[in-house]
Structure formats: structure tokens, C-alpha cells
Image (cartoon, rainbow, N blue to C red):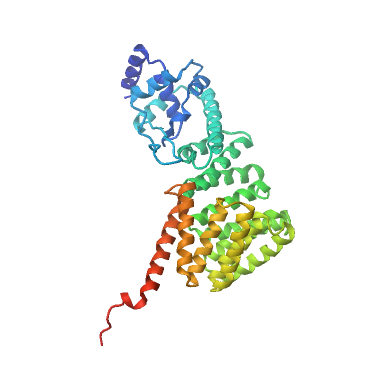
Amino acid sequence: MRHTWDLSLDQLHSDGYTLARPVLQLLALLERAPVPRTLVTPELVTDATGQPATAAAVDAALHQYGLLHTTETDGSEPGSVAIGRLQLHPLVREVTAHALARPEPTNTWFPAIDGHLARAVNAVAGMPGRTGWPTARLLAPHLPAHLDRSTDHSGRSTLEVLANALAAAGTASEELLLRRHVLDAETRILGPDHPNTLASRNNLAATLSELGEHQQAAGLHRQNLTDYERVLGPDHSDTLVSRSNLANALNGLGEHQQAADLHRQTLRDSDRLLGPDHPDTLVSRSNLANALNGLGEHQQAADLHRQNLTDRERVLGPDHPDTLTSRNNLANMVGTLGEHQQAADLHQRVLTDRERLLGPDHPDTLTSRNNLATAQARLAEAGRGRWWWQLPRRR
């Protein structure tokens, strides 16, 4: 098969498609997952192979093979962009990869690939709003190998930047792969007590919480809190964040009293050390309110969420994600207290803002849509009285 494939490539080269072979070889050095079209540039081809390349020549090579897939999005949704994807057939990739000479050209091609991957990640991180999220998801599977080849901190930094973009996009499953890889690398290179390692363990645990793995997250957060208190001291801002994150994981496990006690301690320390308007202090107050809700202290939780919403609108602005979270939390609390119309109005506003800022498919947007539906159902039920849906009881 390799011989047959080489004959085809030779024919294409004779027909003037001189970049066909190097472009295929470059794609074969990446992972099996789709590649964003924007990564395969003339500059990448030239940097890797030394051959002059133009955009028209690269496009010709890609179209000749039918490698340019349909777009990830059609660009019709406000704020979205059309994202092209490239993907080699697994058999073509395998045959092409085996045809590459070792150690060259890969010793010179991989540095070029890694440099362009890093630039692509930085470009995605610099895009406004959710514009770069589709490209970030396509880049994610190709980053672990980039870190494995890296000899300095730049590889870990690149993965962290992309993981943060994926966190903003609400794609925790793709984020998890990068968080695990970074933590393994930093533990091995920097040691378990290095601040970067502790931060990476915290980020991995937070991602696990997003995926509902509260028990595993609580174990990592508990280990981190012990290490932070020992290495940085109990009043360090990272220690306060670690204590808050452990409390959140415990709250997810139903340990509401223990969570509330830890959140109260963190809120007191944040207020004393950072001030009442610091974003971390506002996060602590929100977390305490959530734990109190778990304990059935709904009025106290609602008061804290109302205060937090006012402060976040003033400090962070009405469109900040934390502000939307506060409005959502307050809506949930007033609904629990029987204020169904107010809850529905707040949820409607949050949904409108999240659709505008995050897009219709973001997990937070889906949560808001569900919350609004629940609030509207409760409002309708309250208007009719609970008796309307009950079946007659038989004697």
C-alpha cells in the first residue's frame, strides 16, 4: 500500500502539486484528531520543510486530496465564525507517517509544528468573546504531544493557556486531558510542593468538579489545602482559594455543614486580607450562600446572593460571568422562597445575556434555559393551585 501511495504522490508531484507530499507528511505528524485549517499555513510548510509555499499552493494540495472538510460552524450565528477542519484518513496517516525518514525530517519538522501550535493557541486566547472556542477545541488533542516534546516551561504554559480557553468555553472533558498532562509534567519537573504544581492540581480538581467527580475533586483539594497551608501559610490568597474549593467539593458531596463552616472561615479571612470588594471575597460570599441553601437556610442564602449581585454589578459590571452567576443564584433562591414571578424574570434576563455572551450551546446557557423552564412551570402551578394536576384517589 505504501508503494501504491508513493506512486500516486509521485504522479501528483509531476502534475505540479509539489506540496502534496510535505503537506500530507506534516498532517501525519499530528494526532489522529481533526486539525484546524488555520494551523496549516504556508509559513508552517516553509518552516518545517524549507520549501517555498504560498497559500494558493497549500490550498491546491489540500483540495486535491479532498482534505478540506465542511466547516465547524457556518458563521450564521451572531458572534460565530466559520472553522475549517482537516483530517487524514487513519490508513493514509499511518502509511504516510511510516514513509517519513528518521531522524530527519522529523527532527526539524517537530520544532516548526510546536512553534506554530503555540502561536495558534496564543491567537485563540486573544480572540474576543467566544470567537476562538471552536478552534481551541480542535487544537486540544494536539497539545499533549507538544508538551512532551518541550524542554522548557513554554510547553506547560501553552497547555495552560488553552485549558483556560476551554474552561471558558465550558468544555470540561477536553480541558481535563490538558489539566492532567500539565500536572504530571509539573510534578515530575518542579516537584510536588512547587506553587505551579499546586495551582495545576487545583485546576485539575476544579475540572473534575465541573464533570461531577466530586469525590475525586475533594481528595485533590484536601491534599492541596494541606500543602498550601504548609508551604505558603494559612493567610496566603492561594490557600484561601484552596479552602474555598475544598468546601465546594464537600458541598457537592452533600456535606453542607462542613462546607458552610469552611466557607465562613474563608469569607472572614478574605474580607480581612483582601477587602469586601475583592473578586475572591465575592466568590466566598456566593459559595457560603450556596452551602447555606444546602442546609435549608434559604432566606439567609437569598440575602447573601442579593448582596453579591449588587456588589458584582458595581465592581465587575452587568455582563461579567460572575455577575450572571449571582443573578442566576438569586433567581433560584427567590424561587425557593415562593417568589416565582421574580425568579422567572431573573432567569429570563440571565438566559438572554448568556445566549448573547456565551452562545446557545454553552453549558451555562443550557442551565439557564432549564432554570427558566422550571421557574415558569412553578409560576403556572402557583397560579392554578396545586390541586389541578392531582389524580382522584381511590378508596
Rendering quarter of residue 224? bottom right
Give percent across and percent down for residue 293.
54, 69
Give percent across and percent down for residue 199.
63, 49
- 325 or 58: nearer the viewer: 325
Residue 127 visible to an observer of this rendering: yes
- The residue positioned 55% from the left and 46% from the top of the image is 179
Give percent across and percent down for residue 284.
63, 61
Relative vertical location of residue 50 with respect to residue 113 in this rendering, above or below? above
Q: Quadrant of the N terminus?
A: top left
Judge left or right: residue 189 versus residue 354.
right
Residue 205 visible to an observer of this rendering: no
- 258 or 309: nearer the viewer: 309
Rendering quarter of residue 64? top left
Judge left or right: residue 181 versus residue 278.
left
- 38 or 226: nearer the viewer: 38
Q: How many numbered tags mark residues here? A: 0
Judge left or right: residue 298 versus residue 370.
right
- The residue positioned 57% from the left and 37% from the top of the image is 158
Q: Quadrant of the C terminus?
A: bottom left
Relative vertical location of residue 152 with respect to residue 14 in this rendering, above or below? below
Judge left or right: residue 259 versus residue 105.
right
Relative vertical location of residue 73 with respect to residue 235 in this rendering, above or below? above
